[in-house]
Image (tube, coloured by chain):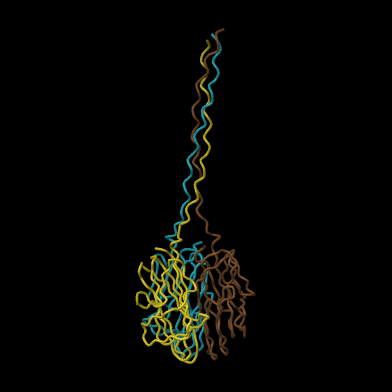
Chain colours: A cyan, B yellow, C brown
Amino acid sequence: MGPRGLIGPTGETGVKGQKGEPGETPDDSNQRVAFTVVRLSTSDASTSHYTRLPFQATETLLPGTSFDLETGTFTCGVPGTYVFMFSVCKYSSNYLRVYLRKNGDAVVSGQSTDSSHYEQVSGSAVVVLQRGDTMHLTMYGRAYSDSDHKTSFSGFLLYPE
Amino acid sequence: MGPRGLIGPTGETGVKGQKGEPGETPDDSNQRVAFTVVRLSTSDASTSHYTRLPFQATETLLPGTSFDLETGTFTCGVPGTYVFMFSVCKYSSNYLRVYLRKNGDAVVSGQSTDSSHYEQVSGSAVVVLQRGDTMHLTMYGRAYSDSDHKTSFSGFLLYPE
Amino acid sequence: MGPRGLIGPTGETGVKGQKGEPGETPDDSNQRVAFTVVRLSTSDASTSHYTRLPFQATETLLPGTSFDLETGTFTCGVPGTYVFMFSVCKYSSNYLRVYLRKNGDAVVSGQSTDSSHYEQVSGSAVVVLQRGDTMHLTMYGRAYSDSDHKTSFSGFLLYPE
């Protein structure tokens, strides 16, 4: 009997693997944070720069946004870059200083020392917050508001971390 | 004749598939809405809290943003969460109250009752709008502006619905 | 000896290649631009509408954001739609005009002519910027600030181009 035949040829290379899935489209639906709160009562006075300005109604409060009206405090649940804006009406017969505070420290502030007229004290800032950081306004002097919401505080998440 | 040769070896594993395409960047090009409009004339007076403050020029108006200068009215075309900001210069010899209104109702307002000086009345709010909702300013008193745009109204879409 | 046997059969096809990696999630981290800068010193006076208001500290400056404190100038590195906000405290014994300028031209401005009190002059605007465009504030009169940051300037990228 003759020798065994030669070994057969190598099989074909397997087919190329499937292309990977497309990357995920960012879903930011749980990363929406925004509020506008207002005061309704005509007067609130303070003789300390650290007295928190309470609020009495929410004009806008997106789901998941944490704002405590009684202490006027926003608590950060989604870390990121935020924008805050305030406009507080000074009571006519007093001066008014308003402070936007992060965890108690002044970020920006504003004032009017005209004790004869109603006037707005407005300000704003961009702030980077970690989870649990708080933002609130304090005031020194006397703030006015009414059913037309002459005193308001707004904030929103600009960029999630 | 000798026996048939052995079966050939298994082919090589196929090459790895290509990496998937990058995820899609959400296409928000039709979800960009923003404006800044200004007044140019020196005076506009009103004795009603419901008189709309007209504007006279656009500093910024993104394509698709609907703002009617004559009635000072923004109409929402893309539902979502919006931010509005205004700064209106009070005429020296009058008081001034300014209201930011959604479909006619005051969201926030501001005032200056100092009838001897020019002053700014500024405010802002975050508002959730449906398609067709309108935003405008009304004023009571007398507003001032000039070619340096001392009176302006801005808005932008923060989060599409 | 008989002839060699027949050649063996072809081996099996190799296994399919691995699936490719998923694509990358779009990264917008280089499209985040935001700042809040503040003044600390008590006084800065100017008798020209074109004097740039310098700043002295950054409250917030995201990586890649270009702001020159000495000239108070933001330079656009990422083209797109931006929002700018300012609040400048008027020195009690002077008037104050504040201008938000794009490449030197007034976008919006504000004033207080009450030369007896400290007051805030606040304003804001949405502006479309190309790479290299600059934004700064100029003032005419006298600005006040202090360690509580009564004078501030903020800006952020709303929509990259």
| Residue depicted at 50% across the width and 31% down the height | C14
Q: Residue reaching furthest top?
A: C1
Please tell me which residue lies in front, A29 or C138: C138
Residue A52 visible in the shown view: no
Q: Which of the image's four quarters has the N terminus of chain C? A: top right
Q: How many marks?
A: 0
Q: Residue B131 appears in which quarter of the rendering?
A: bottom left
Above or below C11: residue B129: below
Residue B159 visible in the shown view: yes
Q: Residue A43 appears in which quarter of the rendering?
A: bottom left
Q: Position of residue C148 (x, y in %)?
A: 56, 79
Above or below A157: residue B87: below
Q: Position of residue B139 (x, y in %)?
A: 40, 83
Q: Is residue A148 left or right of residue A160?
A: left
Q: Position of residue C100 (x, y in %)?
A: 55, 77
Please tell me which residue lies in front, C67 or A95: C67
Q: Position of residue B75 (x, y in %)?
A: 38, 71
| Residue depicted at 54% across the width and 63% down the height | C32
Q: Residue reaching furthest right?
A: C70
Please tell me which residue lies in front, C103 or A72: C103
